[in-house]
Image (cartoon, rainbow, N blue to C red):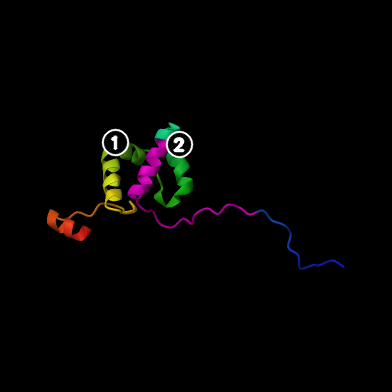
């Protein structure tokens, strides 16, 4: 007797992230993308198309990668400072106050 309740075997497809609205890259994502660029020696256009598959909400474009490369030293410095403060680097931008003493108190 045949069992009609059996479903045919289907291959599992890799799920792509669901695209919602555009988001800004976190510091950690920027560093990850820049490190990948240096490791793979890819053009800025290839970087944006490669990472758009992984982070479609960032909607990366070549001019944005160029800006990150121009300010890479500052981004690396901010990331090192975030890690030294035991932060994850997932913040969108550094929070600044007018009074440095307030910043120190907030870090506690």
* Residue 24 on the magenta segment: yes
Task: State the residue at coordinates (33%, 48%).
Answer: 27
**Residue 61 location (% of width, % of height):** 39, 42
**Residue 57 appears at what percent x and percent y?**
42, 52
Q: Quadrant of residue 105?
A: bottom left
- Are there few (<14), some (14-19), or many (20+) residues within 10 Å of tag 1? few
Residue 100's x, y, as percent? 13, 53
- Residue at figure coordinates x 42%, y 41% from the top left: 48
The earlier-in-sequence mark between 1 and 2 is 2
* SS assignment at label 1: helix
Magenta highlight on residue 52: no
The quadrant of the picture occupied by the C terminus is: bottom left
Nearer to us in this view, 78 or 46:
78
In the picture, which quadrant includes the N terminus? bottom right
Residue 89 is situated, as x and y percent measured from the top left of the image, at 33, 51
Q: Is residue 67 visible to the viewer in this orientation of the structure?
A: yes
Residue at position x 36%, y 48% in the image: 28
How many labels were placed on the picture?
2
Badge 2 marks a residue whose secondary structure is helix
Query: What range of the chain is rendered magenta?
Result: 12-37
Residue at (27, 37) in percent of width and height:
73
Residue topped by disc 1 = 70
Residue occupied by mark 2: 46
């Amino acid at each position: 007797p045949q069992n009609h309740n059996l479903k045919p075997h289907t291959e599992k497809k890799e799920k792509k992230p669901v695209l919602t609205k555009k988001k800004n890259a976190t510091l950690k994502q920027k560093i990850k993308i820049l490190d990948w660029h240096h490791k793979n020696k890819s053009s800025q256009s290839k970087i944006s198309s490669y990472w758009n598959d992984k982070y479609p909400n960032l909607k990366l474009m070549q001019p944005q990668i160029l800006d990150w490369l121009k300010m890479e030293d500052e981004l690396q410095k901010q990331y090192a400072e975030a890690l030294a403060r035991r932060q994850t680097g997932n913040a969108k931008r550094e929070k600044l106050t007018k009074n440095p003493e307030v910043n120190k108190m907030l870090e506690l």
